[in-house]
Amino acid sequence: MKPPLLLSYVVFLIITTQSIPSTTGAKDFIYDVKGKKVLNDAPYSIGPVIWAKGGGIKLTDTKNNKKVCPSYVVQDPAEVNKGGEFLFTLISDDEKREKYLQTSRTLGIDSGRPKNGSCEKWTFWQIADPDAKPPSNLVTTGGTFEEDVSCFQIVDYPKPTSPKVHSYMLQHCPYYCGGTPPVRCYNVSLYEDKGTRHLSVSSGTPFEFVFEKAK
């Protein structure tokens, strides 16, 4: 196999297969667009590296112009919009909470919305069934912290758009929070349905995003 083909094959394997949470004890911190470490359990917005391809990630309570519950996690179509603010919280057995987010560590993502009404009872991102078809494999709110359906991890994007920017991809890892086999993580991509770009487990290219600290 020629070297260029071998390199392409390796990159393909990285993008299409799962990552396992690190057990080496080394800390690979996550950085925002300004090069600062991303704080654990603090509000951040996330969006594409190139904003011409759409805006930031947000919640929507409607689908086909109808009110839905729970909320869908989608990309804002307007590139000028940074989207919503979310809390990324590491799942840890340590008594002392980690100060910064780390790659390949299980975490929960909280929408931070007021818990008023039936739609807002549980606010963590979740995927009901990553092996199913839409809408069951779409990212929604409605989960709770440290639950298998709400178990995610962030990993470095294997082939970043810009070498000057720290970019990442999201994976859903139900097994690592008490879920049943198989032992794997599912890449989160963008799935478009009637003009709306949903975060979802799909066969598309994993969604590449960056962090921006909330003001």
Image: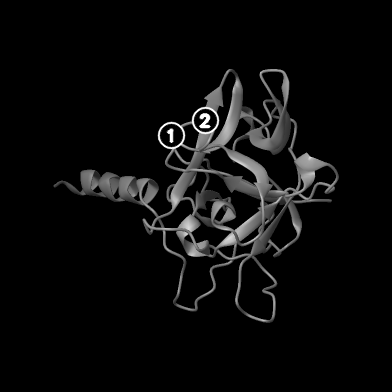
Q: Are marks 2 and 1 in contact (CB under 8 Å)?
A: yes
How many residues crowd mark 2 within 10 Å: few (<14), some (14–19), many (20+)?
many
Marker disc for residue 204: 1
Seen in the picture, residue 76 relative to 168 is either above or below; the reply is above
Question: Which residue appears farthest toward the front when viewing the image?
Answer: 118
Q: Amino acid at mark 1?
A: Gly
Seen in the picture, residue 62 relative to 160 is either above or below; the reply is above
* Residue 100 or residue 129, whichever sits in front: 129
Which corner quadrant of the image does residue 128 belong to?
Answer: top right
- x and y percentages locating residue 203 in the rendered image: 40, 35
How many residues crowd mark 1 within 10 Å: few (<14), some (14–19), many (20+)?
few
State whether residue 203 appears in this view. yes
State whether residue 31 appears in this view. no
Distance (Cα) linking label 2 and label 1: 8 Å
* Residue 47 or residue 7, whichever sits in front: 47
Q: How is the image coloured?
A: one colour
| Helix, strand or loop status at disc 1 | loop
Residue tagged 2: 191
- x and y percentages locating residue 177 in the rendered image: 53, 63
| Helix, strand or loop status at disc 2 | strand
